[in-house]
Amino acid sequence: MELSNRIAVVTGAARGIGAEIASVLLQRGAYVILLDFIEDELAKTVENFKKQNSKVESIVVDVGNEQQVIDTFKFIKKKFGAVDILVNNAGISPKFNGKSISIHETPLKEWERVLNVNLTGTFLCTRECLPLMKKGNWGRIVNLSSLAGRTSGRIAGSHYSASKSGVIGFTRTIASEYAIFGITANCVAPGRIESPMSKTATEEANKRFIDSVPVGRAGEVKEVASLVSYLCTEDAGYINGATVDINGGMFMS
C-alpha cells in the first residue's frame, strides 16, 4: 500500500486504460478521483469500484474546456487540499468507417478537437495541479502518449500522432522545470492495447498491426496500468522526463 494517503487524479477514467489505472492506484492505497466526460460509463465504473473501496470519487469534466478544468481542481483543492498524482490519460482518436482520415481530407474542426482533448487537456490539468504539488513539495505526473507519437499515426491519423508527440515534448518541459520541487513527469507510450479505442479501428487493420508486433499479440490494459502505477511511487523518484515504451517491441529505442 505504498500510495496510502496520496491523492490521485486520473483523466479519461471511465473505461479502458484509464479505468484500469484508477483501479491499480486504488489497490496501491491511493484515494483516486476519476475524471471523464462520458457521464453514464463514469458512474458505472465508480459504482463498481465503491463495492470494494470507498476511497474513490468521480467528476464529469471535458478536459479540453478550460473553465471546467479550473472548476474541477478548485473543488478538489477545497475537498482534499492536495493532488499528489496526476495521470493524463484522456484522449480521442476519431475514425470514419474504422479508418483515420488522410491529412489532405482532415477538416480543421476535427484537427482542433483532437489536439484540444489530447494535448491542451493535458496542459490544462497539469497547469492546475502543479501549484498543489509544489505546495506539498512532491508530485508524480504521468502522461499517456502513444506509439503513434513515437513513430507515425499508421491507424490513428495525423492529428492523433501530432498530439501525442506534443505530449512527449510537454512532459520533458515539466520534468526539467519542476523537478526541483520534488515533482517528476514521465510519459508512457503504449502500442496496440486491447481497449475501447483500439476497437474503433477495423478488425483487418488491428490484425495487420498485431501481426507486425514481435511478441505477436496486443497489449492488455493491466500491463499499461502496472507501468503507470509504478511511475507514481516513491521508488520511481529518479525517473524523470522519460518516455517509457510499452508496445511488444514494435518500436525500440
Image (tube, rainbow, N blue to C red):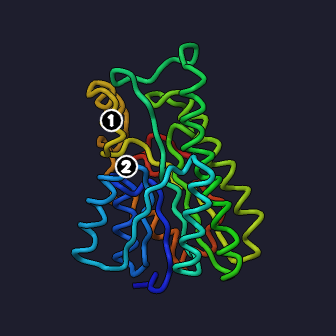
Q: Is residue 88 above or below residue 93?
A: below
Q: Residue at x 58, y 66 (%)?
A: 73
| Image location (x, y in percent) of residue 199 | 30, 36
Pick the front one: 250 or 187: 187
Sort mark 2 into few (<14), some (14-19) or many (20+) by Cα contacts within 10 Å. some
Horizontal arrangement in the rendering, residue 203 relative to residue 148 (left or right): left
Q: Residue at x 60, y 69 (%)?
A: 74
| Image location (x, y in percent) of residue 192 | 38, 41
Q: Which residue is mark 1?
A: 210
Horizontal arrangement in the rendering, residue 17 relative to residue 108 (left or right): left
| Image location (x, y in percent) of residue 44 | 26, 59
Q: Which residue is mark 2?
A: 38
Pick the front one: 1 or 47: 47
- Helix, strand or loop under label 2: loop
- Helix, strand or loop under label 1: helix
Sort mark 1 into few (<14), some (14-19) or many (20+) by Cα contacts within 10 Å. many
C-beta proximity under 8 Å, tags 1 and 2 = no
Q: Is residue 105 above or below residue 150?
A: above
Q: Residue at x 57, y 76 (%)?
A: 84
Q: Is residue 179 above or below residue 253?
A: below
Quarter where residue 180 is shown: bottom right
Which tag, 1 or 2, sits closer to the chain's start? 2
- Label 1, label 2: how many angstroms apart (C-alpha)? 29 Å
Q: Name which residue type carries label 1.
A: Ile
Q: Residue at x 34, y 25 (%)?
A: 98
Pick the front one: 73 or 30: 73
Q: Name which residue type carries label 2.
A: Ile
Q: Is residue 13 above or below residue 194?
A: below
Horizontal arrangement in the rendering, residue 225 relative to residue 79 (left or right): left
| Image location (x, y in percent) of residue 81 | 58, 81
